[in-house]
Image (tube, rainbow, N blue to C red):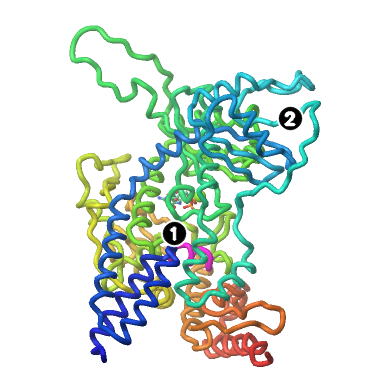
Amino acid sequence: MRISTSVGAAMASSIAMCRLRIRGRGSLLKCLQKVDTFLHRHIGTNLVAAKAESLQKEETDERDSRKSMYAVQEERQAQAERSVLISCHSRTNEKRFLKYLSKHGDINKYFFYEGYGMYAVVEFAQRESVASLLEEAVIPSVSHESTVPFKSRLLLLRNLGGSADSQSGHQLQPQTTVPINELIQRLSKEESIDRQVAALTEAYQLTEENSRLRFLVCSLLQDVAAAYFPECTIRPFGSSVNGFGKLGCDLDMFLDLDGISGRNKKLPKSGLSLEYQLKRANSERAVTQSILSVIGECVDQFGPGCVGVQKILNARCPLVRFAHQPSGFQCDLTANNRVAMKSTELLYLYGGLDPRVRCLVFTVRCWARAHAITSSIPGAWITNFSLTVMVLFFLQTRSCPIIPSLDHLRDLAGPADKCVIEGNDCTFVSDFSKIQLQSNTETLEQLLCEFFDFYATFAFNKMSINIRKSKAQNKPEVAPLYIQNPFETSLNVSKNVNATQLERFVALCQESSWLLQQRENLSPRGANGGNNTATPWGLAALLLPSRVAEIKGRKKRKREPASERIKSLLESLKNNNQPKKKS
Ligand code: GTP
Ligand code: MG
C-alpha cells in the first residue's frame, strides 16, 4: 500500500515529534521506530498518529505536572537541612560507615564523591538525627587552641585505634563534566544530530547528586549567617536551579531576610503594640553592603571549608565571592537580588515548557565555551545569561513559536503571581498547565542550523533582542549588542559586550551554519584509521577549534575578505576529510 505524500509527511512529522518527546526513553523510541517502519510499509498511518498523539499528551501531562521552582526549592531545602557532609578516607568501609551513622536514625539517601579527598553526603529521614549526630561529634583536642570552635554539619570521619578499613572502589558520583575532547568523541559516535544534542545535554546537565550538594552548601552557609540572622534563608539561584546548569558551574546564592518574623506583619489599627528598634543606614544598598560585609567576614573567619573570601561590595550587585573547598563550588553570595531570583524562575519556566529549549541552550552554551565566546572571567564576553536569552528569543520568533513571549506569560498570571520589585513588573504565570503551546515540530537538528543562520544574519547594528515582546526592536541606545533586560526593561543585559566579541560571535555563527550545510557533516563519518576514534561530524565538528575564531581573535588584524574565509574553511574541511579517505 502506498501512502500519499501529504500523509507521509504528516506521519514523518508525528514520528519526528515522538522521537523528540520520548528522548531518554530509549526502548520505547526503538520500538516506535520499528513500528513506524513497519506501518510505513504495510498498513497506514492511523496507529502511528494515535501513538504520536498519546505521547504528545503524555508530554503535556508531564509538563503540566511540573512543580513551580519554589516548590522544588522547598523540597530540596528540607532535604539539605536533614543532611551532613562528611570527609572520609577513600578506604572507608561503606557498610560499617552506614551502620555507624544509622545509630542516629534512618538514612534516606547517601552518596560518595571525590573532591579534595573523598566525601559523603548523607541525608537522614529526620532532622533530629542530624542533631543527635552533632551531639556525638567532638571538637578535636589536638591544636584545640588554634582552631575556631564553630560547630557545623561539615564533619570529618576518624577511624581511631580500630583495624584499618580495607574497602575501596566506592561508586563515586561525578561532579565535573567530561573534557571537551572526550565529549567530541562521544558525540561523533551518535547516529544523528538530534541524538548528539541530547547526548551533550545528558553529559553536561547537573546530576541529582550535584543539585543536592548545591542545596547542602547553601544550607551550611545559612548556618553561618544564622549567627547574625537566625531566621534568614540562603537560596541558590542562576544556573544551579534554572535548569540550564552545567556540572561545574558556579553557585549563586541569595541571602533572603524576608522570613524574619515581623517584617511583613501588619500593625494593629488601635491599641498598644511593640516594634523593634532598628539601626538605620543611608540607603538600601548601604544595608546590603553592611550585611554582606559582616557575613563575608564571618564566612572568612569561621566558615569551615570556605577559602579565598573576597568582599566585592562596590559592584552594581554587591557580593561575597569564595571557594567552598569540600564541594569544589565557586560561590557568589548576594543579598537584595530579587530580580535575579525572578529571572531564574523565568528561565526555569521556559526550560520546562518544551524539552528542546534546554537542549538548545546547553548546546549553544557548550559551543560558545568551546570557541571562547563566553568565559568565566568577567570581561567583554557574551555571558551565559545573555546567550540563554538569545536562544529563548530565537525560539520565540520561529514562524510557529516554540515558547511564548514574556508579555503573554504575564497576561496568564493569576493574583498569586503578581510581583513588583523596585517598581519593575516581574509578574508572570508560574503554573505550567495554564500555558498553551503551539505545535511546532521542528527537530533539534533543524533548530540548531536555523539558530546559527538567524544570528549570522541578525541586524545587530539596528535591532535589539526583546523576549518580553518576542520581537526585535529598534535599539534604544548605542551598544554593539543590545538585549533588553526582561524585567528592568531600561537596561541592556549585554552592555559589557564590545564590537570585537560580537563580531566573533557572528563569524562563528556564519561558520557553524555553513559547516552544518556540508554533506559530509550531516551523517556519521565512521572510524578514524585504526585507533577506534570516530571522525567528528555534525555537532561534534562544530566544537572543534575554529579557523575563523582564531583569525577573528587576533585583534586589530586586517579583516579577511569573505572569499578568503571560505577558502580557509574549505581547506580545513578538506584536511578533516583526509583520514577517512586514507582508511
Ligand atoms: P553560569 O553561572 O554561567 O552557568 O550561568 P548563570 O545563569 O548562573 O549566570 P550568572 O552566574 O552570571 O548569573 C546568575 C543569575 O543572575 C542569572 O541566571 C540571572 O538570573 C542573573 N543575571 C546574570 N547576569 C544578569 C544581567 O546582566 N542582568 C540580569 N537582569 N540578570 C542577570
Ligand atoms: Mg551562575
**In the image, what residue occupies the spot 67% across and 87% down?**
579
**Mark 2 element type:** loop
**Mark 1 element type:** helix
Verify whether residue 538 appears in magenta: no
Crowding at dot 1, Cα within 10 Å, few <14 / some 14-19 / many 20+, comes out as many
Q: Is residue 363 above or below residue 8?
A: above
Give the magenta part as a residue range: 359-368
> Would you say the beta carbon of the disc 1 residue lies within 8 angstroms of ligand 1?
yes
Front residue of 145/101: it is 101
Front residue of 541/100: it is 100
| Residue 578 on image: x %, y % | 66, 89
Q: Earlier in the sequence, mark 2 or mark 1?
A: 2
Front residue of 545/441: it is 441
Q: Which residue is mark 1?
A: 386
Give the total of numbered labels.
2
* Distance (Cα) linking label 2 and label 1: 47 Å
At label 1, the amino acid type is Ser
**In the image, what residue occupies the spot 38% across and 65% down?**
22
Q: Is residue 170 above or below residue 508?
A: above
Look at the image and tell me in which quarter the C terminus lies: bottom right
| Label annotation for residue 158 | 2
Front tag of 2 and 1: 2
Q: Is residue 476 above or below residue 153?
A: below
User: Can I make out residue 454 in this image?
Assistant: no
User: Can I make out residue 524 in this image?
Assistant: yes
| Residue 212 on image: x %, y % | 51, 42
